[in-house]
Amino acid sequence: DSGVTQTPKHLITATGQRVTLRCSPRSGDLSVYWYQQSLDQGLQFLIQYYNGEERAKGNILERFSAQQFPDLHSELNLSSLELGDSALYFCASSDTGEGAMNTEAFFGQGTRLTVV
Amino acid sequence: LAKTTQPISMDSYEGQEVNITCSHNNIATNDYITWYQQFPSQGPRFIIQGYKTKVTNEVASLFIPADRKSSTLSLPRVSLSDTAVYYCLVGDGATNKLIFGTGTLLAVQP
């Protein structure tokens, strides 16, 4: 158990809909990262938050947004869903704002999103 | 942003030592080298991290030559349960991104 909790574990929704994925980081970790993993794209970095502020942005679509709340949990919002958005979405946390380059990042078990 | 290059796949047998090499020619002075392991449908798991020379923990060793342009993850006496994808990451402290490459799929056979 990494200590990072993601909900829900599975989500099935229709095209055009909007969903929210939730991540609770490990206790004490200030950084949260979001990733998308699909079969043909590998593990894609989406966005990072540190203590409530956006710190780094990757290949995140405009239809996607995220935020980190004062209690440090984070939510990833996906809207106008398309079939191609079907993927595993992972959240990770670490205890530094300098990325996880000199420390360890802990990953949750992911949310499997299926868009039909 | 330092890019990494790893073999796409490797095969091994139980009990053998496996060495996976990662190239990172553009590594910056402040960058660390980190390896993660990922099983299907699970989140990546930290294996080991180093800056230079050699680092060893209970599951692996990491060898980094003086020029730091490559690194080698060494897994001693692999078992079937070590079948997974192994990712090499190089730190990018300036942009705070945790970027994964394509990884190496290690297949361990009996």
Image (cartoon, rainbow, N blue to C red):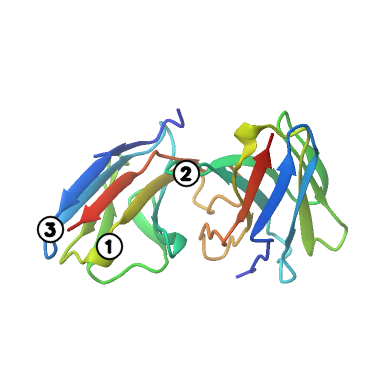
Q: How many marks?
A: 3
Q: What is the distance, in whole Å, between disc 2 and disc 3 at their CAs?
A: 25 Å
* Residue in the picture at 11% in, 60% down: A17
Q: Nearer the viewer, residue B80 or A106?
A: B80
Look at mark 1 in the image and give the residue it sits on: A85
Determine whether label 1 and label 3 are within 8 Å by CB.
no
Residue at the image position 21 percent from the left and 67 percent from the top: A82
User: Secondary structure beneath disc 2?
Assistant: loop
The image position of residue A85, as x and y in percent, is 27, 62
Query: Which x, y percent locates residue A96?
Result: 51, 46
Q: Which residue is mark 3?
A: A14
**Chain on which label 3 sits:** A
Marks 1 and 2 on same chain: no
**Alpha carbon separation for disc pair 1 and 2:** 19 Å
Q: Residue at x 82, y 48 (%)?
A: B63
Q: Given the image, on which type of amino acid does mark 2 rest? A: Pro
Q: Which residue is mark 2?
A: B40
Which of the 4 image quadrants contains residue B9? bottom right
Whether residue A75 can be seen here? no
Q: What element does badge 3 sit on?
A: loop
Q: Secondary structure at mark 1?
A: helix
Q: Amino acid at mark 1?
A: Asp
Q: Residue furthest front?
A: B110
Q: CA distance from mark 1 to mark 3?
A: 11 Å
* Front in this rendered view, residue A100 or A114: A114
Q: Residue furthest right?
A: B66
In this rendering, the answer to whether A12 lies above or below A9 is below
Q: Is residue A61 above or below residue A53?
A: below
